[in-house]
Amino acid sequence: MPDMESLEKALWESSDSESRDFMADYLRACPASRGLWHQSRPAYETVTSFLKSMVVTAEPRFAMFGPGLEQLEISLVTTMLNSPNILPVTGVTQRQINGIGSGISFMYSGQHKFNILTLYSTNRSERERARLEHVDVHSRLFTLRDDEESGRPVFSLAPSVQEVCQAVDGFIFVVNAERGRESDEAMEKEFAQITAMLEPVWGPSSRPLLVLSCTSREGPECPRVPCLKTAQRLKLSLLPNPWMVQDTVADTLPGFLDGILWLLRQTGMRI
């Protein structure tokens, strides 16, 4: 959207409401219209996509990280591994990165294989202790250093994570969307971690970022932060990379496949 803040205002409050075509903005951004765009692309884009499919033979790889992997009562990764009706697992890479991540291969729609490399901030026992005590853990993925000019957090990547960022085709950032964990300080930190992963030195800015706005369960007992708020607080509009925020639930994975479909299409897969 060109101006996400305008979605929270009444039409008469918007200074350029008379000149803006809100319906055109909506149609350009809504998932249904994006799907139609993929079905009727110009001939030159179809040829480009075909050439990319001829060159890229390996399955796309995505790095998945974020507090939503570690802070929720229900594990998103565990549900993914135990939901063959949604996303069948085709293989698990035994090699880990300093005990904080491993690769899992999945099959989308019975024919499109892809790999997700899950990056945890630390080992399982430390993550579980931090979740139960509601405290932050010392991350092995990032090294924190303050920007003297802005005073905002700046992160650099561990060498092993740098290798991952150079090898993957896109990123999945999992947000804890349960109300009560959405402080401005936490969002500032998460934005800094995202930008560290997406640094141009590791790869092109054309690589997509899927943000999963995730809660443990669905329903009034587990109220969520709207995905629009998540996009605003993470300042995603400042990123040069293509991005999308998708609501999902760790318990049942609604909407998860929509996000994966968007990711795969962004890498050039013809789906």
Image (spheres, helix red, strand yellow):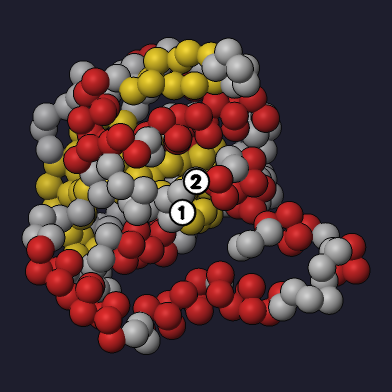
Of helix, strand and loop, which one carries label 1? strand
Q: Is residue 249 visible?
A: no
> Residue 134, located in which quarter of the rendered image?
top right
**Tag 1 residue:** 243
Please say if 50 is above or below 147: below
Q: Amino acid at mark 2?
A: Leu
- Image quadrant for the C terminus? bottom left
Please tell me which residue is depicted at 30% across the width and 54% down the height of the picture.
83
Q: Is residue 130 left or right of residue 227?
A: left
From the viewer's side, name the closer residue of 118 and 224: 118
**Tag 2 residue:** 239
Q: Amino acid at mark 1?
A: Trp
Please tell me which residue is depicted at 23% across the width and 44% down the height of the picture.
168
Q: Which mark is residue 209?
A: none
> Is there a contact, CB below 8 Å, between mark 2 and mark 1?
yes
Q: Position of residue 209 (x, y in %)?
A: 41, 49
Please tell me which residue is depicted at 72% across the width and 78% down the height of the picture.
21
